[in-house]
Image (cartoon, helix red, strand yellow):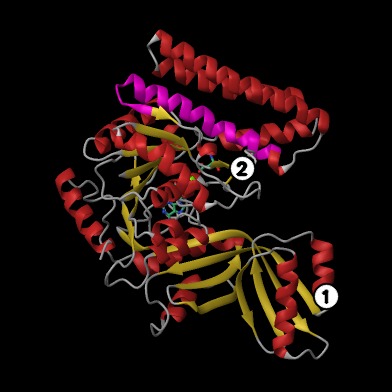
């Protein structure tokens, strides 16, 4: 069994959707498959904006934007579905969702309050719309696609906007509602990103969460593989928007991929790898525009590759906080008190570096600043700098490689580095620099570690299906070792 996930750009226009249909047809020829879809294109961003406009009482603007989304979805439906009856059914369903969105926008503008619960309900419509459309397209092209509501399958807690899945309840739902369809040769079509809490209220798994949905379903079935189809050839040696000649990384371990995702490589949602790793399910990242390309295969171990560095990621919007103890705390007590404050404000620390009397911490979101800072100031002198970035260099066994940290820092020069973390994980060396230095620092690092290797992305990008299959079988054998 395979779980195939298609991202926003993969379902963003007509040609891409035709490509998706061809991929599903091909993958379904030799194994049962299910499909998970994100919202079309930038629909989720638009919905966020519409909800915000509505609460700020700019209802006219909100409804105008909603009208645009509506036209885009109806236009796509008309262009892709030719059967009158099927088109009318789809049109009625889409119209019902848009009527609900409009109703919600109007209520938001009266209440002037956007609770996380209402936001989840609102945003979920992006995936509800795209999956209705895709199911109709697949059915019209003769594929046995069945639409399912992920809210009846991915059961979560009630942490709206970042819900945590209830694996036991979801496993039961998958066994009862999804597995039988696969066994009958049907193709279940589900929404990524969304779920529901025990009371049936819609929840979401966090922005970009459709990858996570695919991995959860893969683990719950369990599937033999999860395929993440997107708009790049796989996981690349760096973000291609900063490094246009970034190359494909053919193999990564779960740990390497998880570090890259956590430190900003947007191509995978950070939580995606954990469920797959638990069940040793290979995760492939592949390009819908090049279905015969090799893609990236993520597995337990990748074996020796010769190159110490596999890929470089970065995370923007970092604040660096330094606290220097002023009261003569005992060193262990000082650190405990500092972390207590972060715990109380539910703030994750991305990197940390300490001496006996001071600590520097890199965090992604600064909580309600004043009270948070006041509490820290009771422990010592506090300084903070915003607009920083974390750069993360990933590769198996980086720790302990002599001279590697020096090479990394030299490659970042002359841009100042305000913190370095080495040793926290054996596969990651990270440092903090100014956010505005990223467009220079990332390409410099990339040149330093990838300049001499042959370009395997643009050269022989496409392997024959038979060759890909061989590669694939090898990967799966390794995964199940
Ligand atoms: P989808 O809509 O398919 O989920 P995303 O936009 O979320 O796609 O993720 C794919 C994008 O991630 C790519 O277009 C690329 O710009 C960006 N990206 C950032 N870092 C990397 C990386 N190391 N490898 C591949 N893509 C990356
Ligand atoms: N549509 C959602 C988002 O844009 C989920 C996803 O794309 O993975 O965040
Ligand atoms: Mg994504």
The percent position of residue 409, horizontal first and vertical second, equals 49, 76
Q: Nearer the viewer, residue 26 or 392?
A: 26
Residue at coordinates 34% horizontally, 49% vertically from top-left? 223
Query: For mark 2, what is the residue?
Result: 203
Ligand 2 neighbours mark 1 (CB distance < 8 Å):
no
Hey, which quadrant is residue 296 in on the image? bottom left
For marks 1 and 2, give the CA distance.
Answer: 37 Å
Kindly tell me whether residue 6 is visible in this rendering.
no
Q: Nearer the viewer, mark 1 or mark 2?
A: 2
Q: Is residue 328 left or right of residue 173?
A: right
Ligand 2 neighbours mark 2 (CB distance < 8 Å):
no
Q: Which span is picked out in magenta?
A: 118-145
Kindly tell me whether residue 421 is visible in this rendering.
yes
- Count neighbours of disc 1 (C-alpha within 10 A) and say few if under 14, some if 14 to 19, many if 20 or more: some
The percent position of residue 470, horizontal first and vertical second, equals 16, 53
Rendered position, 425 above or below 480 = below
The disc placed on residue 377 is: 1
Q: Main secondary structure of the magenta part?
A: helix
Q: Residue furthest top?
A: 84
Q: Is residue 66 magenta?
A: no
Q: Earlier in the sequence, mark 1 or mark 2?
A: 2
Q: Is residue 25 left or right of residue 374?
A: left
Q: Which secondary structure, mark 2?
A: strand
Q: Nearer the viewer, residue 98 or 246?
A: 98
Residue at coordinates 46% horizontally, 74% vertically from top-left? 408
Residue at coordinates 66% horizontally, 87% vertically from top-left? 355
The disc placed on residue 247 is: none
């Amino acid at each position: 069994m395979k779980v195939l996930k298609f991202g926003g750009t993969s379902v963003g226009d007509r040609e891409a959707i035709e490509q998706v249909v061809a991929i599903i047809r091909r993958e379904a020829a030799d194994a049962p498959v299910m499909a998970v879809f994100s919202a079309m294109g930038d629909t989720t961003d638009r919905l966020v904006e519409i909800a915000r406009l509505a609460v700020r009482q700019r209802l006219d603007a909100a409804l105008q934007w909603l009208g645009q989304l509506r036209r885009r979805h109806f236009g796509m439906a008309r262009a892709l579905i030719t059967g009158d009856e099927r088109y009318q059914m789809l049109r009625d369903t889409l119209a019902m969702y848009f009527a609900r969105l409009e109703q919600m926008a109007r209520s938001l503008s009266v209440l002037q309050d956007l609770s996380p619960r209402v936001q989840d309900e609102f945003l979920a419509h992006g995936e509800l719309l795209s999956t209705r459309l895709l199911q109709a397209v697949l059915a019209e092209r003769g594929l046995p696609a069945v639409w399912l509501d992920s809210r009846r399958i991915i059961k979560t807690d009630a942490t709206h906007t970042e819900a945590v899945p209830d694996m036991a309840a979801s496993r039961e739902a998958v066994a009862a509602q999804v597995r039988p369809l696969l066994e009958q040769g049907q193709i279940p079509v589900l929404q990524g990103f969304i779920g529901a809490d025990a009371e049936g209220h819609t929840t979401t798994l966090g922005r970009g969460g459709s990858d996570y949905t695919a991995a959860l379903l893969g683990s719950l079935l369990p599937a033999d593989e999860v395929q993440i189809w997107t708009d790049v050839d796989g996981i690349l040696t760096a973000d291609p928007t900063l490094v246009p000649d970034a190359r494909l990384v053919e193999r990564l371990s779960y740990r390497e991929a998880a570090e890259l995702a956590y430190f900003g490589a947007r191509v995978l949602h950070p939580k995606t790898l954990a469920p797959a790793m638990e069940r040793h399910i290979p995760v492939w990242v592949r390009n819908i525009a090049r279905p015969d390309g090799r893609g990236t295969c993520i597995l337990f171990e990748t074996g020796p590759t010769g190159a110490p560095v596999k890929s470089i990621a970065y995370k923007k919007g970092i604040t660096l906080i330094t606290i220097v103890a002023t009261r003569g705390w005992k060193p262990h007590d000082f650190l405990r008190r500092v972390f207590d404050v972060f715990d109380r404000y539910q703030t994750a620390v991305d990197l940390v570096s300490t001496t006996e009397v001071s600590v520097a911490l890199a965090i992604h979101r600064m909580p309600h600043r004043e009270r948070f800072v006041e509490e820290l100031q009771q422990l010592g002198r506090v300084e903070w700098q915003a607009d920083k970035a974390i750069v993360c260099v990933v590769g198996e066994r980086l720790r302990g490689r002599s001279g590697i940290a020096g090479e990394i820092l030299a490659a970042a020069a002359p841009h100042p580095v305000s913190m370095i973390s080495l040793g926290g994980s054996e596969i990651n060396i990270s440092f903090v620099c100014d956010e505005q230095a990223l467009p220079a620092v990332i390409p410099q690092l990339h040149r330093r570690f990838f300049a001499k290797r042959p370009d395997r992305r643009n050269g022989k990008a496409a392997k024959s299906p038979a060759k890909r299959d061989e590669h694939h079988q090898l990967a799966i054998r390794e995964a199940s070792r």
